[in-house]
Image: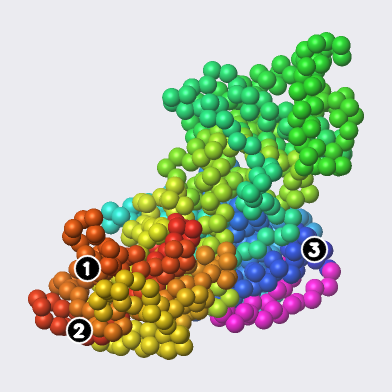
Amino acid sequence: MTDDTPIIVEPVAAPAAGRWAPVAGPETLDFLSTVVPEASRDDVRDAAVSILSKSVPPTGEAGQETGLIVGYVQSGKTMSFETVAALARDNAFQIVIVVAGTANPLLDQSTGRLRRDLRLDEPDRARRWIQFQNPSADDATVQTIRDVLDDWRDPGTPEEYKKTVLITVLKNYRRLQNLADLVQAVGAQAVPVLIIDDEADQASLNTEVAQGQESTTYRCLMALRQALPSHTYLQYTATPQAPLLVSIIDSLSPNFVQVLEPGEPYVGGREFFADNLTYVRVIPPQEVPTNSNPLTEPPESLLDALRVFMVGVTAGIREGRNTGNRSMLVHPSHRTAQHQEFYNWVRDIFDDWKRILNLPDNDPDKQELIEDFRGAYDGLAQTVGDALPDFDALVPSLRFAFRNTRVLEVNARGGRTPPVDWRSAYGWILVGGQAMDRGFTVEGLTVTYMPRGIGVGNADTVQQRARFFGYKRSYLGYCRVYLEQGTLRAFQTYVEHEEDIRGQLEEFQVNGHPLNDWKRAFVLDTALRPCRNHVLEFDYMRGRFSNDWVAPRVVLASDAVVQANRRAVAGFVQGLVFGEDDGHLERTDVQRHHVCHDISLRTVIEQLLINMRITGTTDSQRNTGLLLQLSKALEDDADELCTIYRISPATRRRRGIDENGEVTNLFQGEAPVHPRERRGEIYPGDRAIRDADNVTIQIHTLNLTRDDEVVAENVPVLAVWVPSRLARAWITQDGQ
């Protein structure tokens, strides 16, 4: 699209939850038509409109807003925030700031992509942007930005001469402080500003919050925000655990959310970690380098991964006509010494295989190597199918494929992470660690070899290593991921955790509820922590109910709470038909109960459990975990059933409480107690009153006593039994 092409401005109605209605104008439509695949344009535009509609309106009114934008790893978050930036430009935002990465290669990568996709360097295009990278408050920069902002203020400035200031800045406290100083010097009163924080869960958050202090990067971000009276701060991430768990009074706690949906060609955790693990290979324990298991030679699994990759490169070169890239990522450790060891192995293997491939065809070593490649080919053929050229047709091209594949060590051991010149070769093997953990784009990645464990088990860190996700459905058959067993399990369990969080956040997005109202609870395997603890001011509770009774400890509440709970129980049991439960004839009235079987668990949750008010903080968190666990059971089987018991309906039980309102012993014990051989013969105890396989709820109605004096009557208390087949690990955090 050129500047003289007629532009149709599209007013797009803001979602019901939005504050105002952004207009998709020339910059947005230009970007969509030149950068975004046609099939995705409407979805990308609509998501951008939804995001910007929740921002502080570009009318110059003072105010700050923080939003959380959640995508999958490698799913197109950059394209999303580029679209939002273009839309902001169309809607008179005068400054767009992109906080892009913690390392210079990531900043350069993001800046380069923004300049290319927004077409800043095309000479025949109107100057809609003026871009600065890591600016400081020098006179020339201050005056330039002042002039640009004055153009917006001057009603005589033609629209085509109004430029939006685009700033890309390293997520580094010195660079951010320089930018804050620049903004202060320029003066941003009544200037609408958009701040985009890429990989917002990394480095931006306050890492010293537990000590009651502010980390340097966080402090400088706060100084930048303080200098901007009218701005919206968008947190882009694929791993939102930390931003979701910071205190809601923190400036970086998001108030609204947008969950990004990837395009159809995207493949992620569900494709790689389904039950059959088609594209995953397990690295044997003896081939995983550890302090107790140092490797002295390249493991066989690495050789297998290299052969699979090179067969794919050979096929890609044959079919790709010298365009695009195929890459392999070797991610052995966070230690650079181990990177060098693996790099040397790969380099030596490459040199040896290239030498052998140049031998005469009848040489035994060459014939043996060709047969090894045939084995790799046979494995690929199972997933690539008919699109894979015949092996004998590929063999003559193997030498050419090796000559067009580069091996590069990617870390900062030499002082700076080396850039990857993707255009200089078709095939790439990158050996590295932290430099490729997040944000780093690996073009055409097909084979990943990752013999490292999960470390301390931060879920967000583990997931950010999934560079092998992305828009690669067209060549998914060539993809392989080699993992050690613990990391494989972490990725498998993360899929459920990720979908759980996304599903909850999508509900808030659709309903327009402020994210501060979200109950901080989600499923997460016990082997993983949600994020690094030092960014959280408040701790979280984790649990997993399995063959457990769940009942509140604090049972004494205000009259209003007790009355509400009485109404909830009475309304629920009114439509049920109870019968006498079976038991010993010598049971007392206290030991005789009424039971109702085969009640829909969904009905029980909706009409009873969520209506019960729980007052104790710990009880409330456990109850949230219980409801989350039961909701996951319904996702697996919507027809789950429940058994309801009315405990001692003929006589009201008395239970003692302490000074905190906690019940000393809710459950009746076994009878008789003595002699031991007859214990429980007449009554097995309340804990045994349950269904063997389904969720069971006991409804207790109590008179509460303290020092033998009744302090509350007719207090309903629920106890819930969760069978082991419905076990799920979860995390909850009390809202602050």
Give the SS element for disc 2.
strand
- The disc placed on residue 712 is 2
How far across and down, in percent of the image, does residue 566 sit? 33, 86
Q: For this rendering, which residue is in front, 552 or 416?
A: 552
Using the rendered image of the protein, determine whether residue 586 is visible from the camera's viewpoint: yes
Q: Nearer the viewer, mark 3 or mark 1?
A: 1
Q: Identify the residue at horizontal 53%, vertical 26% (top origin).
A: 286
N-term-proximal mark, 3 vs 2: 3
Q: Identify the residue at horizontal 79%, vertical 31% (top origin).
A: 377
Give the SS element for disc 1.
loop
Q: Residue furthest left?
A: 707
Q: What amino acid is at disc 3?
A: Glu
Using the rendered view, name the quadrant where residue 425 is placed: top right
Q: Is residue 20 magenta?
A: yes
- The disc placed on residue 38 is 3
How far across and down, in percent of the image, does residue 548 sit? 37, 61
Q: How many marks?
A: 3
Magenta-tinted stretch:
5-28
Position of 550 with respect to 384 (left or right) is left
User: What secondary structure do most residues of the magenta stretch adopt?
Assistant: loop
Q: Which image quadrant: the C terminus? A: bottom left
N-term-proximal mark, 3 vs 1: 3
Position of 292 with respect to 651 (left or right) is right
Q: Nearer the viewer, mark 2 or mark 1?
A: 1
- Do the numbered discs 3 and 1 sit on residues whose CB atoms are within 8 Å? no
- The disc placed on residue 665 is 1
Position of 582 with respect to 45 (left or right) is left
- Compared with 198, 553 (above or below) is below
- The disc placed on residue 24 is none
Q: What amino acid is at disc 1?
A: Asn
